[in-house]
Amino acid sequence: MKIKFSATADVVIRTEAWDEAKACYGSVLGLRVVHESEACTGFDTGAFRLYVEPGPRHDPIFEFLVADVQLAKHQLLAAGCAIIEEDPAIPRCYIRDPYGVVFNLGKAGTEN
């Protein structure tokens, strides 16, 4: 069964300099805050939503939604992808493809 992947307009970055990053995106770039919590701050860039999380730095994460996350994960792993971070409580499943792109795999129909 072929899984259909649909990209969202969300990009996530994580940084240990969270307060400085929020100030940069909000004050210097003038981006509007669209989400604020202890876990992340989201900004509307006009073309996509940029979410900034506190924690150890990682490169930007894109997001794809699928109807069946477990089946998609199985197919991606069989195609040479690797899970680099997973937390079902969030839910979060960061996957790196064989070409270096990292994305979150989410369930379609659950986006905000």
Image: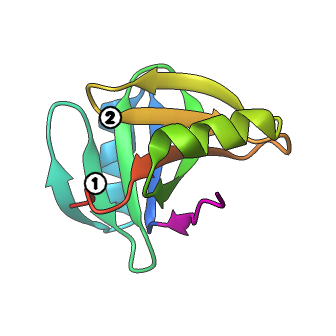
Compared to residue 52, the image places residue 30 above or below, namely below
Residue 71 coordinates in the image, percent (x, y): 55, 42
> What colour-coding does the image apply?
rainbow
- Residue 60 visible in the current orientation: no
| Number of residues whose C-alpha sits closer than 10 Å to that of mark 1, classed few (under 14), some (14–19) or many (20 or more) | many
Is disc 1 placed on a helix, strand or loop?
strand
Is disc 2 placed on a helix, strand or loop?
loop
* Prevalent SS, magenta region: loop
The residue tagged 1 is: 42
Q: Are marks 2 and 1 in contact (CB under 8 Å)?
A: no
Quarter of the image containing the C terminus?
bottom left
Q: Which image quarter: residue 81?
A: top right
| Number of residues whose C-alpha sits closer than 10 Å to that of mark 2, classed few (under 14), some (14–19) or many (20 or more) | few
Q: Please name the amino acid that badge 1 sits on.
A: Gly
Quarter of the image containing the N terminus?
bottom right
Q: Nearer the viewer, residue 2 or 81?
A: 2
* In the image: residue 58, left or right of residue 101: left
Is residue 92 magenta-colored? no
Instruction: Identify the residue at the far top of this view.
Output: 56
Is residue 6 magenta-colored? yes
Per the rendered image, the range of residues in magenta is: 1-7
Residue 30 coordinates in the image, percent (x, y): 31, 68
The residue tagged 2 is: 91
Residue 24, numbered circle = none
* In the image: residue 10, left or right of residue 109: right
Q: Disc 2 and disc 1: Cα gap in Å?
A: 17 Å
Residue at x 40%, y 34% (from the top left corner): 92
Residue 99 coordinates in the image, percent (x, y): 85, 45
Residue at x 25%, y 56% (from the top left corner): 110
Instruction: Identify the residue at the far bottom of this view.
Output: 46
